[in-house]
Amino acid sequence: MSDHVNNPNRKAPLERYRNIGISAHIDAGKTTLSERILFYTGMIHKIGETHDGSTTTDWMEQERERGITITSAAVTTNWKQVKNEGISKVFEGENFQLNIIDTPGHVDFTAEVERSLRVLDGAIVVFCGVAGVQPQTETVWRQATKYSVPRMCFVNKMDREAKDPFDLLDELEEELHIHVRPLTWPIESGVRFKGVYNIYEQNLNLFQPSKQVVTEKVAVDIHTEELDQRIGADLADRLRSELELIEGVYPEFNVDDYLKAEVAPVFFGSALNNFGVEELLNCFVEIAPSPRPVKAEERDVQPDEPKFTGFIFKITANIDPNHRSCIAFCKVCSGKFSRNTPYYHVRHDKVMRFSSPTQFMAQRKTTVDEAWAGDIIGLPDNGTFKIGDTLTEGEKLHFRGLPSFSPEMFKYIENADPMKQKQLAKGIDQLMDEGVAQLFVNQFNGRKIIGTVGQLQFEVIQYRLENEYNAKCRWEPVSLYKACWIESDDPAELEAFKKRKYQYMAKDREGRDVFLADSGYVLQMAQMDFKHIKFHFTSEF
């Protein structure tokens, strides 16, 4: 292994890096959990709450107003593992570097979640103890399965009247097609909630409903009377029989099965009351994988290679409203990134330097001089980057697999204030770079069409144009079924198609031909009539 992996200048060696994503259905408590993790790791000293709009990772105005996560926020923090009698003690007291990505839960932002999953090495999926498995949880889970990301489950809101824990586990196995293994176990829920027994550390965590105090931990032998004194004889007997049942029903927890994404450990707690979060973190840093090799088209890139490679997985416009700047998020896949060093931009085929790379605390950022494999950094972007771009020290590499999506809803975008034409054009341009919506220009009438996967995105775009770019837009309906990117080896047939369908032909931002079919039937007929034309539903082909 190269010496740079554990170079003394690194904040933490590679094996102590953890890229962690937090995802769930809307309102299950992901942002609340992210805030608690930041509080525990000493990154913030006051916990923000979603309901009063003071959270760190939900920093956009719209997020705070609606109380939902719209854009994935990236935060870098450190965690010292607390003494732990659990699975192993290898890292006791060592410093871990955590890159946390809080992803959206709303169904309209599924593409954003999927892009984030490409850079994660492990995920924590939050479930609501009251509602159980919800539709968007299933979507997120399927996406993580696709990229074989190892997952842990955190059953939140145990301070409310929750479902029976055994029923919850059955529901997880049934709905998500995964084996589960509880590593902590709740004692009652709602007003009767007493706490959690930590199975793998073998201690009892007693619940105190408080948003700022960390819970008392007691090491107890469950077979002694001490347990009866702590929680009462009836509950103690019930806990003993439930733990016996767990040992009988669920196989012993195996870390390798978790790393292969075949089994998911389950933790219970209440993020709002700071309960159960520390146990989750301790276990996560202990067993979650450090940065894994990344697949490129040409080869697999190992994190311990000496030369720098990285790819852009996300672009955020206006992270600093005073400067109207865009930031491209880059995952460092191997080697070391240094400030002001020339790097090769593969798509543009030219060498570039970056004078102010940054690390993030959601929208607050600090300039860094160097970054290492496993880090996530922000590079200032003035239109040079697209999602999926690769940077190297000269090697031609293409990191693939960043999904582009097929739009499902379409609307004409019109300028509502003729004096602000320039601001609108800039705003549309920068917001399209983020990759959550797509722009098409109709060749017949020259009108601009925006395609998204959900209604909420139109509202967010309109709001952001007005508030961030001082431009007003209005939407007009257009009835379309699908956007299809077309190509053909037969130029004559392509021309004939474009002539016949000229009313429905558009160009995307790259100038590629897109056929906007207005119904499934029209698309089917076009595919039958023009045999030599390939129809692609995403722009990546």
Image: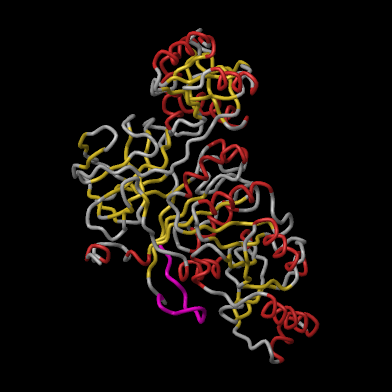
- How many numbered discs sit on the rendered protein? 0
Residue 500 horizontal side relative to residue 276, left or right: left
Looking at the image, which is closer to me, 121 or 480?
480
As drawn, 294 above or below 88:
above
Residue 359 horizontal side relative to residue 225, left or right: left
Residue 207 location in percent, x, y?
67, 71
Residue at the spot 44% in from the left edge and 19% down from the top edge: 513
Residue 78 horizontal side relative to residue 8, left or right: right
Q: Is residue 129 magenta?
A: no
Q: Which residues are magenta?
A: 78-91
Residue 352 location in percent, x, y?
22, 37
As drawn, 263 above or below 92:
above
Q: Quadrant of the N terminus?
A: bottom left
As drawn, 454 above or below 83:
above
Residue at the spot 62% in from the left edge and 39% down from the top edge: 66
Q: Quadrant of the C terminus?
A: top left
Which quarter of the figure has residue 245? bottom right
Looking at the image, which is closer to me, 498 or 168?
498
Residue 126 location in percent, x, y?
61, 57
Which quarter of the figure has residue 354? top left
- Give the residue at the far bottom of this rendering: 224
Looking at the image, which is closer to me, 236 or 384?
384
As drawn, 13 above or below 69:
below
Q: Is residue 81 magenta?
A: yes
Residue 21 location in percent, x, y?
50, 54
- Give the residue at the far right of this rendering: 234
Which quarter of the figure has residue 244? bottom right
Residue 95 horizontal side relative to residue 537, left or right: left
Q: Main secondary structure of the magenta part?
A: loop
